[in-house]
Amino acid sequence: MKVLIVGSGGREHAIAASVKKSPKVEKLYCAPGNGGIGELAECVPIGAMEFEKLAAFAVEKAVDLTIVGMDDPLVGGIVDVFEEKGLRVFGPRKNAAILEGSKAFSKDLMKKYNIPTAAYENFTDADKALAYLETAKFPIVLKADGLALGKGVLICNTMEEAKAGVREIMLDKKFGAAGNAMVIEEFMTGREVSVLSFVDGKTIQTMTSAQDHKRAGDGDTGLNTGGMGTFSPSPFYTKEVDDFCQKHIYQPTVDAMAAEGRPFTGIIFFGLMLTKDGPKVLEYNARFGDPEAQVVLPRMKNDLIEVIEACVDGRLDTVQLQFEDNAAVCVVLASDGYPVAYEKGIPITGFENFAGKEGYYCFHAGTKLENGQYLTNGGRVLGITAKGKNLQEARANAYAATEWISFANKYMRHDIGKAIDEA
Ligand code: AMP
Ligand code: GLY
């Protein structure tokens, strides 16, 4: 079959690598793709938000299945556009992608269906939000309602910071229209875990757990980023935690969406906080995590296409997900200065070191190929993933592999997966 992937990051490279392994796939396209994805797929220069052009391309090439990797097109309704044209597509429709697209919606859903999450209030009026702060306990968490590249969350320790934050989000529109509404919520403490799942509208099957490192600097300092590295599985995600989440969070979320007339088909990513009062939902995403996909997918034994087709056809209950009994660690190589300002267009060398190395992956996030030379083309440049028999071994392997790649402004965290030593 012919498959089209929509997106251009490390996540889409990891999806492409898994799709490519399926014996069912004879031709793979990616729009717009990136330098590394181009080694696996034919990259098509159509932007992820150009729904009509993408659908016309899928019709023209007789694409059998489109997989949407990114949040923006899903929230914008790409699946509806494809479905109207009779095209097979994997991802939630617009009315279900709102689970990620509006934090106010997701908080209200959790409240209505008793799904554990932080206490909160929603606001569409800056003055009311500022007045509410007078009664708040600190630290407090401010969230822009809409998509903000993972950067629309502010944790404020003082009243001054919080007031400035409300003004930035709602009045200065630092995150654009994402700040037309906002959520103010209780600050929670605990271990964070990411659990990705396949959903077919009614059935949910969770994948192996992972943990992301969102802050730019070692020791979880600095600004929030899209994610600086991941490991899988999380040793803190025990059988007991899983049992609780299966019962109180995962299926209830899928049932709630169906009950609201918004059946969800696609990937639900549960961002969880393991608090002393039990697991609670930090956020939902309507897609694979990035870089979570870069550690979870390489460990999946199933044919990804078979699982995705089962979701699209509403028969996920017939699938048994299987993951390797090992571990994986991904260290992101970024451009120094990310997530604020950084140079692009710098030559990258060393890719040949990955050739023929089983269990090592060099996923491209922000690269481009120019005259046969790979150049940096974004904040997050590469995701270096390695497997190992356990997390310690996977971490040592991943950090060894980070040395195989060179570029002038290469930056990475040195403590990805360090938390596992405390498990
Ligand atoms: P989100 O995009 O909602 O996952 O938030 C980004 C990051 O902010 C999370 O991964 C957490 O580290 C942190 N965060 C979000 N909400 C809370 C909360 N209620 N309490 C503590 N930390 C939070
Ligand atoms: N790594 C977090 C995310 O994909 O949102």
Image (spheres, rainbow, N blue to C red):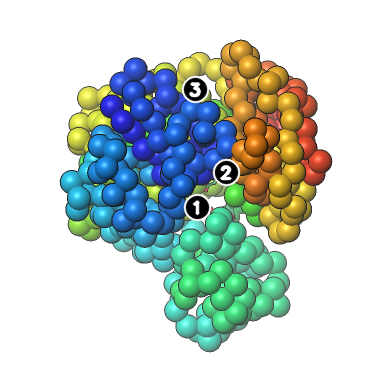
Q: Is mark 1 within 8 Å of ligand 1?
A: yes
Tell me which residue sits at (28%, 59%) in the image: 95
Disc 1 to disc 3, how far (Cα)?
A: 25 Å
Q: What is the secondary structure assignment of the residue under circle 1?
A: strand
Q: Indicate left or right for 59 with 72 as reference.
A: left
Q: Is mark 3 within 8 Å of ligand 2?
A: no
Badge 1 amino acid: Leu
Tell me which residue sits at (31%, 31%) in the image: 2
Q: Which quadrant of the view contains residue 328?
A: top right
Badge 2 amino acid: Glu
Residue at the spot of label 3:
299
Q: Is mark 2 within 8 Å of ligand 1?
A: yes
Verify CB contact (< 8 Å) between mark 1 and mark 2.
yes
Query: Which quadrant would the C terminus be assigned to in this image?
Result: top right
Residue at the far bottom: name it.
Answer: 127
Residue at the spot of label 1:
282
Can residue 230 be seen in this snapshot? no
